[in-house]
Structures are given as structure tokens and as C-alpha cells.
Amino acid sequence: MSVSIKISSRKDCYNLIITEKATFIQGDSGKGKTSFTRAASSSTGYYTTVVSNGFELYVLTERLFRQSCEDALRKKRYAESETGRTIPNERFLKEYWSQEENFPHENRIIIIDDEAFIASKSFKIFYEASKSCYFIFISRDSLSDIGYSINEVYDFVAEGRNHFLKPKYSYKNSPTDKISCVVVEGIGSDYIFFKELFSQAKVFNPTSLGTLKSGGRNT
């Protein structure tokens, strides 16, 4: 399902369409990425915001993410006191957030602007547990632990007051049809990237047994 986002003021107009759970926005400084984040979180009435399909925008900062983690871990400490068992944090978060009623967000477009916490194991659990949210990552770096499509990596483009997304990668004219086999190391985003790039080829990983496996290593 695609979701359209329009945020407008007298000075700026942001038009975005996202189609997958993870969307990555990159681009040069001064193109309006940070201004877009500020507009998405503004409650001043200066901006008019329209989001399709009943979604709402939500800017997730490190402080807010840590707060969500701490709220969940308070439940863990209570469970430990009741049962007398020690539960590893990551295991508890995975089990707790996987229950839809416990996940702190529903039907939101979660925007994360250049935050270091997205590389943490806790955030990976958080992201994978989400069942009804979309994520927009405004970041110079990719996330190796989160699978995403190369078609969902965009440059943020500004033309006058209008800001929109432009696909960062285009391989329509690349001679990928001349390659028959590709070997990659990982099972996450790197495997997905090369699988889509070399759609006519066989993409494999070496496994711990020293053989080739389509889809990833067995560790």
C-alpha cells in the first residue's frame, strides 16, 4: 500500500509517496531534509499536513525511543519480581513488542532524522515488531541489519518551494544481464540489494559449511 504525504506552507511544499515499510532519504545539505522533519513535528499551525490512508506523522528521537524501551523494561522488572526469573532484555523486548497491543505506535509514519540509535539491537527488534507503521530514515548511512529494497533509497530534491523524492539508484542501462552468478557475504540488506540488482543472475552466500546457499549463510 502506498501512502502519500503532503506538508505545505507559504514557503515550502513537501510531497512524498512511500510504498514500503522502510524508506531511506539521502541527499546533499541544504535540500530541506531537516526542514521536512521539523515541519512533520510542528504543532504551530504554520503547516498544512495531509497524510493518506489514516496515517499520522511521528518524529522519533533518541529520547523518545529510549523512553519506549524503558517503559517496556519496567514491565520486565515487574515480571521478574513476580516469577523470580531473570529475563534477558533483548528477549523480553522481542516478546513484549511482538504483541500488537504492547507496541507503542499504530498507523504512523515514523520519521527518524540522522539518529545513532537506529544501529542498536533494540531498534532492530523495535522495527521488526512493528506491524502497522512505515519508517522514513533520513540518514547518510544504510542499515546493514534491516532488509530494504534499493528501490526505496531516495535523494531529497528541491525545486523552488517544492521538495520531493527522486530514486537514488537506476540500473535500467546497466549491463547486469551479462552476469550469471553473484556471491555475497550477508543475508540482510546486502543480499536483497544484489538480488534485485542482478535479477537475472543467481545470488548466493557462502555458508559455514563452505558451500553455496541461495538466500544466506546458515549462521
Image (spheres, grey):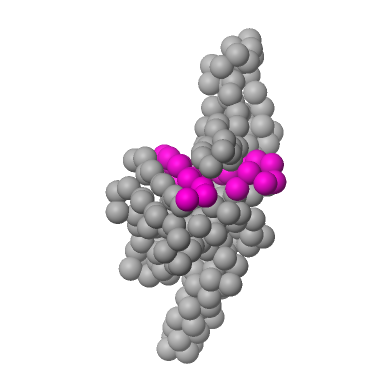
Q: Is residue 170 above or below residue 92?
A: above
Query: Which quadrant of the rendered structure holds the N terminus?
Result: top left
User: Which residue appears at 48% of the width and 45% of the height?
Assistant: 14
Residue 11 sits inside the magenta stretch: yes
* x and y percentages locating residue 198 in the rendered image: 58, 21
* x and y percentages locating residue 66 in the rendered image: 57, 72
* x and y percentages locating residue 8 in the rendered image: 44, 50
In the picture as drawn, the residue positioned furthest to the bottom comes out as: 81
* x and y percentages locating residue 182 in the rendered image: 65, 23
Residue 14 sits inside the magenta stretch: yes
Q: Nearer the viewer, residue 35 or 201?
A: 35
Left or right: 4 in relation to 127: left
Left or right: 94 in relation to 190: left
User: Which residue appears at 45% of the width and 42% of the height?
Assistant: 15
In the picture as drawn, the residue positioned furthest to the front comes out as: 10
User: Which residue appears at 32% of the width and 48% of the height?
Assistant: 52
Residue 5 visible in the shown view: yes
Q: Nearer the viewer, residue 117 or 155?
A: 155
Q: Nearer the viewer, residue 24 or 127?
A: 24
Residue 219 visible in the shown view: no
Magenta stretch: give its range: 10-32
In the picture as drawn, the residue positioned furthest to the left comes out as: 53
In the picture as drawn, the residue positioned furthest to the top comes out as: 178
User: Which residue appears at 45% of the width and 86% of the height?
Assistant: 78
Q: Nearer the viewer, residue 79 or 159?
A: 159
Give the number of marks. 0
